[in-house]
Image: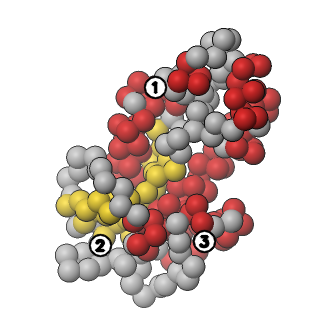
C-alpha cells in the first residue's frame, strides 16, 4: 500500500544478511504504487530464488520508488550488526526519489529517522511494501555474494551466501578469513588462522 491515513507515501523497509559471517547487510526501501499491483509479494525467505528475481524486476518496474542501502563487513565490525543494519536502512531511505510521510520497518527496532516510523514484527509477511523491500534486499545481497564468490571461490559463497553452514565453517578453518568476513563475529574471530 503506497498511501494510507497519513495522506502520503508510505515506505516499507526490510533487510537481508544480519546473520551471516561474511558479506554486507543490505536494506531496501519501497513505496508501492496504489494502481500498479504486484501479485505474489511475500516474505523473501518463502520464495524461490527464481521467483524472487522475477518479483524484483516487477517491483522495480511498478513501484513509485525503491532504493537499496548497503553496509559492508568493515562497517559491521566497526558499528555492530544492529547499527550497521540501521545505517543500511537509512541509506536506502535516503536513496528514495520521493519523501515518505511514514516508514514501516520489519521487526521491533528502528533507527532514528526524520520521518514517522512504525515497526511491525512479521512485517515481511503482513505489509506488502515491506515484503517488496525484503525481496529487493535479498536479491541485491545474493548478487553481492556471487561477486564475493568470484573473488574468493574457496569459501563457497555462491551456495551459502556467507551463512554459517558446515561447509563455510570448514572453509573458514582451512583458509582463515577473507576481506568479506565479519571479523567481529565469534566463529570468524575464533578461527585459528585469523
Q: What residue sits 60% from the left and 66% below the top? A: 46
Q: Are marks 1 and 2 in contact (CB under 8 Å)?
A: no
The image shows residue 162, relative to residue 74, as above or below, that is: below
The image shows residue 25, relative to residue 178, as above or below, that is: below
Q: What residue sits 35% from the left and 44% below the top? A: 86
Residue 36, image x, y percentages: 47, 85
The image shows residue 129, relative to residue 116, as above or below, that is: below
Mark 3 crowdedness (10 Å alpha carbons): few <14, some 14-19, many ≥20: many
Coloring scheme used: secondary structure
Disc marking residue 55? 3
Q: Mark 3: which secondary structure? A: helix
Residue 63, image x, y percentages: 46, 73
Q: Mark 1: which secondary structure? A: helix
Q: Is residue 147 visible?
A: no
Residue named by callout 2:
9
Residue located farthest toward the right when viewing the structure as drawn: 154
- Callout in the foreground (1, 3): 1
Q: Nearer the viewer, residue 113 or 81?
A: 81
User: Total number of numbered labels?
Assistant: 3
Q: What residue sits 50% from the left and 47% below the top? A: 26
Q: Quadrant of residue 164?
A: top right
Residue at mark 1 to residue at mark 3: CA–CA distance: 32 Å
Amino acid at each position: 500500500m503506497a498511501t494510507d491515513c497519513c495522506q502520503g507515501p508510505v515506505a516499507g523497509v526490510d533487510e537481508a544478511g544480519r546473520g551471516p559471517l561474511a558479506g554486507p547487510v543490505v536494506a531496501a526501501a519501497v513505496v508501492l504504487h496504489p494502481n500498479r499491483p504486484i501479485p505474489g509479494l511475500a516474505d523473501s525467505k518463502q520464495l524461490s530464488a527464481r521467483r524472487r528475481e522475477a518479483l524484483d524486476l516487477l517491483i522495480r518496474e511498478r513501484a513509485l520508488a525503491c532504493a537499496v542501502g548497503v553496509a559492508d563487513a568493515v562497517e559491521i565490525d566497526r558499528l555492530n550488526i544492529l547499527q550497521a543494519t540501521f545505517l543500511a536502512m537509512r541509506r536506502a531511505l535516503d536513496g528514495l526519489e520521493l519523501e515518505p510521510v511514514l516508514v514501516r520497518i520489519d521487526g521491533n527496532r528502528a533507527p532514528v529517522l526524520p520521518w514517522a516510523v512504525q515497526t511491525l514484527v512479521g512485517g515481511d509477511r503482513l505489509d506488502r511494501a515491506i515484503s517488496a523491500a525484503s525481496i529487493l534486499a535479498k536479491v541485491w545481497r545474493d548478487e553481492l555474494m556471487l561477486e564475493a564468490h568470484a573473488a574468493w571461490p574457496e569459501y563457497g559463497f555462491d551456495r551459502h551466501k556467507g551463512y554459517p553452514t558446515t561447509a563455510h565453517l570448514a572453509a573458514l578453518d582451512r583458509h582463515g578469513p577473507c576481506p568479506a568476513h565479519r571479523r567481529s563475529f565469534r566463529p570468524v574471530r575464533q578461527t585459528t588462522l585469523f
